[in-house]
Amino acid sequence: MDLPSPSGTPIKSHAHVGVPKQTDYEGKFIVLSTVAPETDADELYQYTHGSRNKEQIWTYMGYGPFDDVCSMRRWLKGRAESGDPLSFTVYHRDLKRRVGMVSFLNIVPDMRRLELGHIWYAVDAQRSRVNTEAIYLMLCEAFDNLKYRRVEWKCDSLNKRSRLAALRLGFRFEGIFRQHMIVKGRNRDTAWYSLLDNEWPDVKKNMELWLYQNPNQQLSLTELNSSNS
């Protein structure tokens, strides 16, 4: 007698699964704001163009650096009109200016999954609390508010900084998609990472500890999240 084929765990349905909002997400150190090309372009262009050091942030992006501020403003208009990717500028409260961008993308509410991507920051905002709080705010929206099951992080497999950031933030490595894309005329193998809803409570606790109860950053978020693995 044939045994029944195995099947997945039943999932409780959510009648009203939404998508991330076009609104401001406010943190202690940063604010995520919907894209406003006319006011955002000058500031973002100034701090991400003009030297090799500034422009290295575009190495693994599918766009940039831009020829001039007008070109960047036109690109930002496309971002402002898009619902997926749904993009936000990152405003740094202490510096009192915009320092980068983040996006929700590949949003699939029926499957309760989405991706965080198109993440870039001016050099002087890197290696700070900026990215951690930006991702924290986005994960709160995805898991706490929208009740999504899975959040993805994908990057060029050669992008060591992004890969380390994914692990530091609590995402788990899933593998490499070989010859996944052609970006700026070059091959891209893509590294995939994910964070699941049942993993989020521990990651959230660690993020809050590192962000808000760790004034001298004596604790390592990487070590905190590694203990959950």
Image: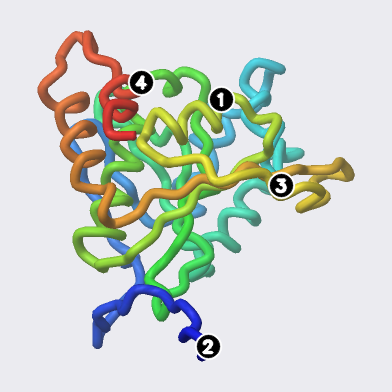
Q: Nearer the viewer, residue 28 or 201?
A: 201
Mark 4 is on which residue type? Answer: Ser
Return the x and y of residue 175 as percentages of the image width and height: 61, 44
**10 Å crowding of disc 1: few (<14), some (14-19), many (20+):** few
| Residue at 34% in and 27% down | 226
Write down the residue under mark 3.
62
Q: Nearer the viewer, residue 111 or 32?
A: 111
Return the x and y of residue 185 as percentages of the image width and height: 89, 44
Q: Is residue 78 something that shows in the picture? A: yes
Return the x and y of residue 75 as percentages of the image width and height: 64, 54
The answer to which quarter of the image holds residue 202 is top left
Write down the residue under mark 1.
161
Write down the residue under mark 4.
128
* Label 4: which secondary element: loop
Write down the residue under mark 2.
2
**Marks 1 and 3, the one that precedes in the sequence:** 3
